[in-house]
Amino acid sequence: MSSDTSISYVASGQIPPSPPPAATTGVMGWMRENLFDGWMNSVLTIVSIAAIVLIVPPIIDWAFLRGVWNAGSLSECREIVAAAHGEGVRGACWAVINERFNQFLFGFYPTHLYWRPILAFVLMFVALAPVLFTQVPRFMLWFSLIYPVVAFLLIWGGMGLEPVESAKLGGFMLALIIGTTGIVASLPIGILLALGRQSSMFFIKTICVIFIEFIRGVPLITLLFVASVLLNYFLPPGTEFDLILRVCIMVTLFSSAYMAEVIRGGLAALPQGQYEAADALGLNYWKSTRLIIMPQALKVSIPGIVNSFIGLFKDTTLVSVIGLLDPVGLLNPIRADSNWNGILWELYLFVALFFFIFCFGMSRYSMYLERKLKTDR
């Protein structure tokens, strides 16, 4: 048997990698992995596409192709649609949003003072920036601390600015005031309540447990009625306690109880070794809580915290039952107008879009924060 020395059984160089199969990359690969991965996913994908084809085109046709943006009444909207598309055809009457847009934003706030809530809204993002993003210079936290006073003066007046009574506040501005106040204030109070509930001090633990269990066992609407009606009976005669301030306090207390349980879940998720490591370093209770325990507990609790924030922001619509004209509270006065009597879907869809934008923004920031703090991967 002759041997051929030219045949090599060991590679003399690096073999270049082969390209991945065409079916696993690009659009086809994504569809195969996410839409048609097995017969069950394939059936669900086909059913979903069929539902979208049946539902979405009529909605687009009603909302955009036949929508009317300029009209003085609902009957005029229907006449415009009938003239353009034929009798019996209906289209969205967005003209009511166009006409009442400022009212949706500011309620009955004086027109010539719109610049004040607009400036307060812009400054709110400036104040939140150093809290939400580490890239922002830390010295701006000083503005974050004084922003509540600045916002109060801008919206309600004082210190040389024309005063505006609370009865004129409404619309999305009112929802943002109540929601932002509740969100910002409930987090630190919830942290203290969660730590108090785990405290070894009997009286502090008892007070925190009673508060949390009582608040969680009472509907928010009941607390709003207490803030609106009953609270005045416990105040000295002649005392004026602004209704919006009362509502903000009740909403904050309500959210704090739920926030405390969310954070307590994060504390319970930490292994005992973290507490022992803090003790081994010689740290006292507050230092170990601030530097080791609470940062990890808050990271674990991010989804629950943001979920509570979103629920709180949507619950601000309940203030309409006590006479405050938030976006939902404004719908009945608008529909009571003879020009817009009978309109419904357009108003609720517009309000829903507002809440979706803010809640979706909070959700996306939560995902960004989770990715950024995923240091254990």
Image (cartoon, helix red, strand yellow):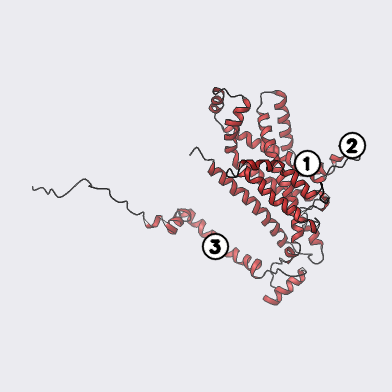
Q: Earlier in the sequence, mark 1 or mark 2?
A: 1
Q: How many marks?
A: 3
- Between circles 1 and 3, the one closer to the viewer is 1
- Of residues 296 and 211, which is closer to you in this image? 296
**Is 311 left, or right, of 270 in this rendering?**
right
In the image, residue 328 above or below residue 191: below
Q: Which residue is mark 1?
A: 223
**Is 167 left, or right, of 355 in this rendering?**
right
Q: Earlier in the sequence, mark 3 or mark 2?
A: 3
Q: Pointer 1 and pointer 3: residues touching (CB < 8 Å)?
A: no
Task: Residue at 81% x, 41% y: name it.
Answer: 226
Task: Residue at 75% x, 70% y: name it.
Answer: 71
Q: Earlier in the sequence, mark 1 or mark 3?
A: 3
Q: Which residue is mark 2?
A: 236
Q: Which residue is mark 3?
A: 50
Q: Secondary structure at mark 3?
A: helix
